[in-house]
Image: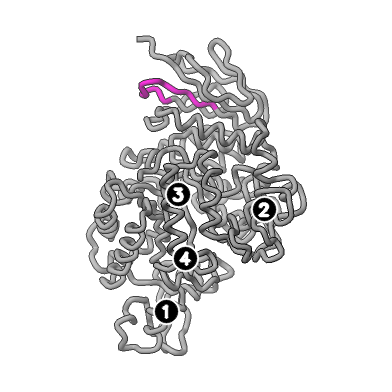
Amino acid sequence: MKIHCNALYQIDPYLFRDSDGHGWGTLDGITGKLDYLAELGVSTLWLLPFFVSGGRDGGYDIVDHCAVDPRLGDLAAFDRLVREARRRGIGIVVELVLQHTSDRHHWFQQARRDPASPFRARYLWRDAPEDHGHDPMFPPVQAGIWTWDACARQYYRHLFYPHEPDLDTAHPAVREEMFRIMEFWLRRGVAGFRIDALPYMVERAREADPAEQGRWLLGEMRRKAGEHLDDPILIGEADVAAGEYGTYLDHGRKLSHLLDFHFNNHLFLALACEDAREIAATAAEYPADAPASTRLMWLRNNDELDLEQLDEDEREQVMRAFAPEPWMRIYGRGIRRRLAPMLGGDVARIAMAHALILSIGQVPVLRYGDEIGMGEELALPERQSVRTPMQWTAGEGAGFGDRPERAWRRPISAGPFGHGRINVAAQRDDPDSLLARVRELLAARRGLPAFDTHCRYEDAGTPGILSCHYADAPTPLLALVNLSGELRQAALPADFVLDATKVARGARPLSDRVALQPYGYCWLQGRRTR
């Protein structure tokens, strides 16, 4: 099932809905909410790890890649989810995490106990730490990337936490295991994978064969997935320069999509300085072999808002705007907050941000709860601050489960983002709610194929307004978004003739321009004059 341009919806299965009263989210809990997701306009679900794990890194420290954490359900529950999602036209994307395993994985346990074990070479061991040019992924929480193992009597490498030893994708057995895992989930009906920490896997593959700088590995993954699907989804997590994107995609012969960290960083810079020129300038950096339709854009995700693609002054500008206090920042590079509080809880501004990522022709990603404006819990450590239960109702436990006293993590209960104020039930039938506005945008976008075509960024006559002109579409489209908190007017392109207004919030079309209220936006359909 191909990703349509409408939306991916990222779900943490542990935190979405508890269906059995044991206190943890479940796969059946997600299945029970599929009608809500279909009504929202979601085309694809991106499930964060639900596998058996060591439980120390949000499920990314995997012990068994082909087994479901029993707290979440079992394979039968997963099959039900896939079947019911498909019945609603929704595909399922799962995580492929093979840059590392848990230190509890049976491969690592055998490797550390026996230097002659065939599993030893599947990890990176050294008699003394080596400098590979990599810094710890989570400074200062993580002191280094090499840890001494007293049992193995060697150091092992871990770019992430010490309980996540790095696999060596230069080793054929590691690649064979990767293909086995892919085949296992493809046979169960998934639409594809989001591939974790991909550049590090490619780097090690280069040690086995330097061809294509190791990116031949992506072609092998594409071929394996293509044995089961005509158009598999392969989303790479690769925080690389804009000019490198095409080498990971290779016109569909390798990845189908990349998470666009570069654009994401500059989008937040544009929001911070209320200047749409930053977005237009960033869009111009991408080569023709990395079109917008192959790049995923989001407002928040499961981790910190990593701002490493900005220079020091730009990063500080975003920090001052959205994370003014030290405890809102993390790892010296990012923000550990949710979108809604970063934007002051202003419904119009939060809706504008959604309109923004839905206007630029990229595939949008919504994190669970962002459609209602959920907040963060800064009392939780590190990235846990943005990992709180979905807020379904104002009742006890936020409707996360029927036994709220058992919930392993409490929902946000106090303040302006507490579940008493922010929840699905309160917004579902309110036409001016954030949920209604996001739903309206997604519904309109589904009926506008122009978003699949090339976007031409226009000069709207004021820096605060983004003007995206899809002039090459059979039915031209103009998307206008006011990033500023002031009333603005945007000039219509000279070759655009207004025919119909598809979406308008805080926007009033005039004869040759559009008046936009603070954080207003509109999508205007044009007609061809010849």
**Mark positioned earlier in the residue sequence (2 or 3):** 3
Marks 1 and 3, how far apart at CA: 43 Å
Task: Assign a secondary structure to mark 3.
Answer: helix
Marks 4 and 1, how far apart at CA: 33 Å
Residue type marked 1 = Tyr
Q: Does the magenta run of residues contain 253? A: no
Is mark 3 in CB contact (under 8 Å) with mark 4?
A: no
Q: Name the front one of labels 4 and 1.
A: 4
Residue 156's tag is 1
Other-residue count near label 2 (Cα within 10 Å), few / some / many at <14 / 14–19 / ≥20: many
**Mark positioned earlier in the residue sequence (2 or 1):** 1
Residue 269's tag is none
Residue type marked 2 = Gly
Q: Does the magenta run of residues contain 476? A: yes
Marks 3 and 4, how far apart at CA: 16 Å
Quadrant of residue 518 within the rendered picture:
top right
Depicted 500 relative to depicted 181: above or below:
above
Depicted 345 relative to depicted 21: above or below:
above
Which residues lie in the magenta part? 470-480
Marks 2 and 3, how far apart at CA: 22 Å
Is mark 4 in CB contact (under 8 Å) with mark 2?
A: no
Residue 399's tag is 2
**Residue behind mark 4:** 74
Task: Assign a secondary structure to mark 4.
Answer: loop
Is mark 1 in CB contact (under 8 Å) with mark 3?
A: no
Residue type marked 3 = Glu
**Mark positioned earlier in the residue sequence (3 or 4):** 4
**Mark positioned earlier in the residue sequence (4 or 2):** 4
**Mark positioned earlier in the residue sequence (4 or 1):** 4
Residue 413 located left or right of residue 97: right
Instruction: Classify the position of the N terminus by image quarter.
Output: top left
